[in-house]
């Protein structure tokens, strides 16, 4: 886990899906993988409020080009500032834990 903007992000391993932002690699995972990674790190998936706080604090440390998994199993799009139901169990999205 790597600290970022008051939250935590699991780091990608091996051939995991990843993107790069701000010199850091960001892991993209399914909801199940994301939930398990946070739990294994002693944390839980971030809530919408936690991600909104991190973004509103003016932190440029969090990429906003791809949505995030929420603790509820929904998806949060930082650009639209809204959550919605995932259209597939196979979506791979960014992961933040709290």
Image (spheres, rainbow, N blue to C red):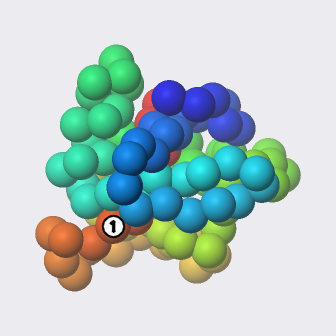
What residue is rendered at 34% in x and 33% in y?
A: 38
The vertical placement of 38 against 41, above or below, is: below
Left or right of 24? Residue 8 is left
Nearer to us in this view, 11 or 84: 11
The vertical placement of 61 against 82, above or below, is: above
Question: SS for tag 1?
Answer: loop
Q: In the rendered image, which quarter is residue 93 located in? A: bottom left
Position in image of residue 42 (x %, y %): 34, 18
Q: In the rendered image, which quarter is residue 84 located in? A: bottom left
The vertical placement of 72 against 1, above or below, is: below
What residue is rendered at 27% in x and 72% in y?
A: 91
Asked whether residue 69 is in view, the answer is: no
Position in image of residue 80 (x %, y %): 58, 79
Residue closest to the far top: 42
Nearer to us in this view, 82 or 98: 98
Position in image of residue 90 (x %, y %): 19, 71
- Packing grade of label 1 (10 A; few <14, some 14-19, many >=20) is many
What residue is rendered at 37% in x and 55% in y?
A: 16
Left or right of 85? Residue 76 is right
Q: In the rendered image, which quarter is residue 39 located in? A: top left
What residue is rendered at 68% in x and 48% in y?
A: 24
User: Would you name the residue on which mark 1 appears?
Assistant: 92
Residue closest to the far front: 14
Please give the count of numbered marks on the rendered protein.
1
Nearer to us in this view, 95 or 23: 23
Asked whether residue 23 is in view, the answer is: yes
Position in image of residue 17 (x %, y %): 40, 62
């Amino acid at each position: 886990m790597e600290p970022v903007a008051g939250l935590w992000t699991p780091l990608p391993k091996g051939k995991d899906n990843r993107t790069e932002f701000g010199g850091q690699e960001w892991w993209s995972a399914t909801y199940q993988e994301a939930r398990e990674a946070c739990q294994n790190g002693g944390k839980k998936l971030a809530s919408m409020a936690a991600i909104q706080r991190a973004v509103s604090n003016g932190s440029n440390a969090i990429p906003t080009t791809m949505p995030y998994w929420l603790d509820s199993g929904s998806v949060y799009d930082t650009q639209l500032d809204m959550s919605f139901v995932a259209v597939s169990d196979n979506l791979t999205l960014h992961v933040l834990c709290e």
